[in-house]
Amino acid sequence: MTHPDPRAAALIERYEQLTRESLDALAGLYAEHCRFKDPFNEVSGRAALRRVFEHMFETVDAPRFFVKDAAVDGDQCWLGWDFHAGDLLIRGATHLRFDAAGLVADHRDYWDAAEELYEKLPVLGGLMRLLKRRLRAA
């Protein structure tokens, strides 16, 4: 996916072409003291952000991001994406805030860990589906 905003376009390209060897190039799009949060991590700084992605490459099979949607308004950016790792598919969204230099200062990922991950696990998945049925309004 391409985007007319150069900050968003650079991020989209880096994420869609992400490899273990390109982690430094990705980290270079982030401010030195950036903040990153997802359902499992909350870290500050480029080095910590890089470690989150190093861990991803160590623990999942062939991770790939596909950005489906992007919207930029001033220094705010939203990305809608699919994450593939082997047989795993996670759909989510990212909210970004750029600093005055055009680097990512804040990065927050939103995705439903229960639906996208836990429900697909053998034992925990059954429990999560049962809870979901019991809590459903209709």
Image: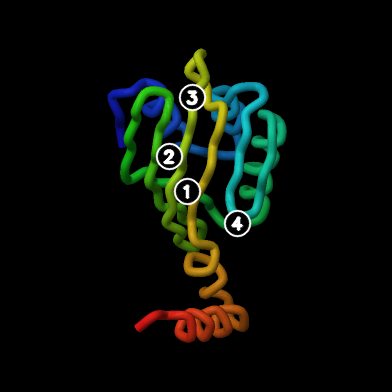
Q: Tell me the distance, in whole angstroms, between the alpha carbons under discs 1 and 4.
A: 10 Å
Q: Secondary structure at mark 1?
A: strand
Q: Tell me the distance, in whole angstroms, between the alpha carbons under discs 4 and 3.
A: 29 Å
Picture residue at 46% right of the left edge, 55% below the top: 84
Amino acid at circle 2: Glu
Picture residue at 59% right of the left edge, 54% below the top: 39
Q: Secondary structure at mark 4?
A: loop
Instruction: Measuring from the top left, give residue 80's x and y in whole percent.
Output: 37, 46
Q: Tell me the distance, in whole angstroms, between the alpha carbons under discs 2 and 4.
A: 16 Å
Say which label, 2 or 4, has the lower sequence index.
2
Amino acid at circle 3: Phe
Q: Secondary structure at mark 2?
A: helix
Amino acid at circle 1: Arg
Q: Which mark is residue 64?
A: 1
- Whether tag 3 and tag 1 are in contact, CB under 8 A, the answer is no
Q: Which mark is residue 80?
A: none
Q: Which mark is residue 60?
A: 4
